[in-house]
Structure formats: structure tokens, C-alpha cells
Amino acid sequence: MEAIVSVEDLSFSYGNTFKLNSISLNVEAGTVLTLLGPNGCGKTTLLKCINALLKPERGKVIINGKNAYELKRWELARLVGYVPQAHVPPFPFSTLDLVLMGRTAHLDFFQQPSKLDRQIAERALSMVGLSHLSHRPYDQLSGGERQLALIARAIAQEPRLLLLDEPTAHLDFKNQFLVLGMVRRIARENGIGVVMSLHDPNQAIMFSDSVALMKNGSLFAVGPPHSVITRERIEAVYEIGVRVVNHTDGSFIMPSMENFS
Ligand SMILES: Nc1ncnc2c1ncn2[C@@H]1O[C@H](COP(=O)(O)OP(=O)(O)OP(=O)(O)O)[C@@H](O)[C@H]1O
Ligand SMILES: [Mg+2]
């Protein structure tokens, strides 16, 4: 199978405070890889290294056969859609204009978005269920609506690789599952590779083709969700007692209530 992104022996450090240690990963076309691990383990840092926002001290990132650190910003923007964890709304643009900005990667410098670009942006907004807000100023949206709009912008970009940093963080109970289902469907239907970070092991089980479990800047385990997310590993990584609950839909992880008594 074709690898959309390969991370090869990547190491990065912020001075001497934190280090990502020799990370190697592959994401194939049409599949979703989830980064799972405690706060501060390095998920956002790794996503930024993959997107060449941070430059590692060692190792490579190959996106669609090209070395990410040798690509120009506009070349990367055609290949990679990135939805960051925290986003400050910078301008009073309409929501549709924000999504339309995803198309700029495909336009020449002075070129105006075409009718087709508008249709692509409108379709992306409708996919995330925000058509009714398309003319509302983006900075007036709720936290979850903003997150959905940013995901729509990344979809409108039509990237080969989609990087999503905690895409469910501000979403309600239903929208979390809708968005994760949509991301997986878009990946499969369009042969896109997805790398996303999540905090819920059960969502990782339900919506990923592979899981990279991280601890202290290192890969603790990587592989198919059920082989990575075991009671022993989750207990070791999160330092909390858990139990596995078997259900007709699969096996899921619950914290043991003894942790809290
Ligand atoms: N610019 C920076 N300079 C120095 N240290 C940083 C910087 N950004 C992040 N760190 C540290 O690097 C470590 C990894 O941070 P990172 O944001 O990658 O974690 P994370 O896994 O995404 O966590 P979370 O689940 O809380 O989002 C943390 O200890 C953090 O404090
Ligand atoms: Mg993070």
C-alpha cells in the first residue's frame, strides 16, 4: 500500500525541557492513525514536526514521496491540511470565507476563488453541518462551531494528508462521533492519510486503523487499535487502573472506580 506519510527516526527537542525520541511511523492512503497519550507526551509537537512547522534535529518526514523539510510552504499547503489544537480567531471574516481560505493553496497569488472553489467550500461546510452559519462572522461562533469550521477549511483544501490535533476537544457528545466518522469516511473515499490526536482510547478503538500510543516523547506501542490498546498498556501509560469491558460492538476501556474512592 502507498504510504502518504512516513516519519523516519525523528527526534526533536525544545532545548532541554522536552524531547521527542526517535519516532518512526507510517500512514497509508485511506487510513487513520491516532496519536494517543497523556497531556504533555508530545502529540502536538509530533504533528507540528510532520507539518514542518518545527524542524527536528534528526530524522525525516516523507509526504507523498517528498521530503517535507525541503518543500516550500505553498507546496506543503497543497499536500497537508492542519487543524491546530488551539486557534485564536484572528478576523471578523464570515465562516464561508474562512473555509474558502482552504482553497488558496490551489490558487495563484492574485487569483480569485472561482465558482468551483465556492462550491467546494460550501460542500465542506455542509459536511460538518454548518451551512446555516456560513454568513455569520467566524469570531462569533461557539468553540465547537469554530472547530467544525476549521475542519471544513481543511477538507476544502483537499489535502493528501490531514493532521487533526484533538479534533473532538470542543465538540458535544454527538458531534464528536459525527466528526470522527466523517474523517474516517473522507479518508477512505478519497485515499487521504489522516494523523489525529485524541484523548479517548475508546474513540481511538472505534475510528482508527492504527494507534500510536505515546509516553514521555517516545512511542510506547504502535499498531492496530486492539493490539495497542490493552489494559496493561493503558495502565502503564496513564498510571491509572482500568478494566476492559466486552460489548457486542467490541472491547472498550473503562477506568476502575477504585481509583476514585
Ligand atoms: N514551545 C515550547 N517550548 C518548550 N517546551 C514546550 C513548548 N511547547 C511544548 N512544550 C513542552 O513539550 C511537551 C510536549 O508538549 P505537546 O504540546 O507536544 O504535548 P501534547 O501531547 O500535545 O499534550 P496535550 O495532550 O496536553 O495537548 C510538554 O511538556 C510541553 O510543556
Ligand atoms: Mg497537544
Image: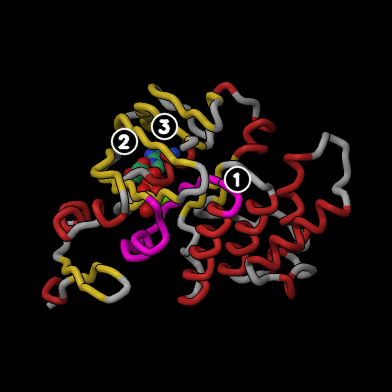
Q: Considering depth in this image, is 81 or 42 the residue closer to the camera?
A: 81
Marks 1 and 3 in Cβ contact (< 8 Å):
no
Percent across and percent down for residue 112 are 88, 45
Q: Is mark 1 within 8 Å of ligand 2?
A: no
The residue tagged 2 is 17
Question: Mark 3 Cα within 10 Å, few/some/many (few <14, many 20+)?
Answer: some
The part of the image, by quadrant, that contains residue 24 is top left
Q: Is mark 3 within 8 Å of ligand 1?
A: no
Q: Residue at x 37, y 28 (%)?
A: 10
Report the span colored magenta: 189-209
- Label total for image: 3
Mark before the other along the chain sequence, 1 or 2 = 2
Percent across and percent down for residue 91 are 73, 56
Q: Is mark 2 within 8 Å of ligand 1?
A: yes
Question: Mark 1 Cα within 10 Å, few/some/many (few <14, many 20+)?
Answer: many
Relative vertical location of residue 125 with respect to residue 111 in this rendering, above or below: below
The residue tagged 1 is 81
**Label 2 secondary element:** loop
Which amino acid type is marked by label 2? Answer: Thr
Mark before the other along the chain sequence, 1 or 3 = 3
The part of the image, by quadrant, that contains residue 260 is bottom left
Percent across and percent down for residue 254 are 23, 71
Q: Which one is in front in this view, the residue at disc 3 or the one at disc 2?
A: 3
